[in-house]
Amino acid sequence: MTRCAVFGTGSWGTAFAMILADAGCEVSLWGRRQELVDVVNTTHENPDYLPGVRLSDAITATTDPAVALAGAEFAVLAVPSQTLRQNLGAWAPLLEPGTVLVSLMKGIELGTAKRMSEVIAEVAGVGPERVAVVSGPNLAREIANRQPAATVVACSDEVVAKRLQTACHTPYFRPYTNTDVVGCELGGAVKNVIGLAVGMADGMGLGDNTKATLITRGLAETTRLGAALGADPYTFAGLAGMGDLVATCSSPLSRNHTFGTNLGRGMTLAQAVAATSQTAEGVKSCESVLDLARRSGVDMPIVEAVVDVVHNGRPTQEVLAALMARSAKPERR
Ligand SMILES: NC(=O)C1=CN([C@@H]2O[C@H](COP(=O)(O)OP(=O)(O)OC[C@H]3O[C@@H](n4cnc5c(N)ncnc54)[C@H](OP(=O)(O)O)[C@@H]3O)[C@@H](O)[C@H]2O)C=CC1
Ligand SMILES: O=C(CO)COP(=O)(O)O
């Protein structure tokens, strides 16, 4: 039986543990709070993040990373992106040779502008064949309700991607393999920023033309960034690109979308943060995505506009007017 460790008892870590168990794996779920770990083990439920969802008996929770990692073929990482470096620093010495590290995270590191797979390779000292990424339109709550969804499992080593595909394939969760790790990660991280922008438009009471424009031009700037960083542009037309962007920008379940809506309705950053109990990665990653774009010489006006609203306190109306006032351009450049 395939053994997996999942780090993070939040909504996606817990839902992904459920997928792995439903696919026939034995799962050890690491959480940092003993109290929640005990509740998961005794009630087979995670009331803090997925209340009402019965978790398989094949999932046991622990606060001990060594217990979680013992015999694990896959170590799945589902903590907030900005905490990965510190957390993985503590877990890496416990890794067994051959364990594949799998990122579920959709953020870019502040300060370094590194993707999560780059942070993993650096901190754990492993080669690209031991780093994989899962990214796609995967709102945790829908998946926890076992509603059908697809995703992409990406690894530069296709054999590893196929092993992970088998480990997480269930009747309701359909993983496709891809070797474009860069494209899949950028799709996941940048869609959160575009989700904030579309949420702002929603909060401002704007309609579907505005939102479709932000989604489509958001995808155009994501693809530009990806092309500059060596990604396959077609990845952005797939599940980890357009697929995730559509899910995030349409769903009230998306934390990034909801956060943007709150800002669009006039909340301050502090008020929107106070209204959000879960991780909205785009709030921090809009700055690191912009940093990455600047380092790569890529123009990302929507990301820049989001940074202006979220971190520079510029009013949404003013930022939107500035976006519309940019010089006229060809659609493709
Ligand atoms: N939720 C979703 O639908 C999806 C999320 N993702 C991505 O998955 C990643 C994880 O997000 P998600 O599960 O949703 O987040 P949640 O906000 O639901 O949960 C966050 C988890 O991380 C833990 N945590 C918070 N801070 C730290 C820290 N400093 N050190 C260790 N653990 C910490 C929390 O523990 P505690 O409860 O103790 O605070 C909790 O278990 C993100 O990158 C997100 O973008 C990707 C696809 C879908
Ligand atoms: O990544 C997600 C869906 O694929 C979840 O989006 P949010 O983090 O905005 O909730």
Image (spheres, rainbow, N blue to C red):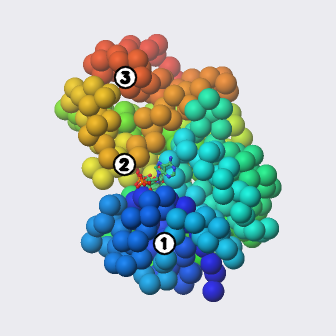
Q: Nearer the viewer, mark 3 or mark 2?
A: 2
**Quadrant, the N terminus:** bottom right
> Left or right: 190 with respect to 207?
right
Q: Position of residue 293 (x, y in %)?
A: 60, 28
Q: Tell me the residue at 65%/38% (across/down).
A: 114
Which of the pair 51/256 is nearer the observer? 51
Residue at the disc numbered 2: 278
Question: Which of the two discs, 3 and 2, labels the residue nearer the N terminus?
Answer: 2
Identity of the amino acid at label 2? Gln
Identity of the amino acid at label 3? Val
Residue at the disc numbered 1: 61
Q: Position of residue 196 (x, y in %)?
A: 37, 36
Circle 3 packing at 10 Å, graded few (<14), some (14-19), many (20+), is: many
Question: CA separation, marks 3 and 2?
Answer: 20 Å
**Quadrant, the C terminus:** top right
Residue at the disc numbered 3: 309
Q: Tell me the residue at 63%/60% (across/down).
A: 102
Identity of the amino acid at label 1? Ala
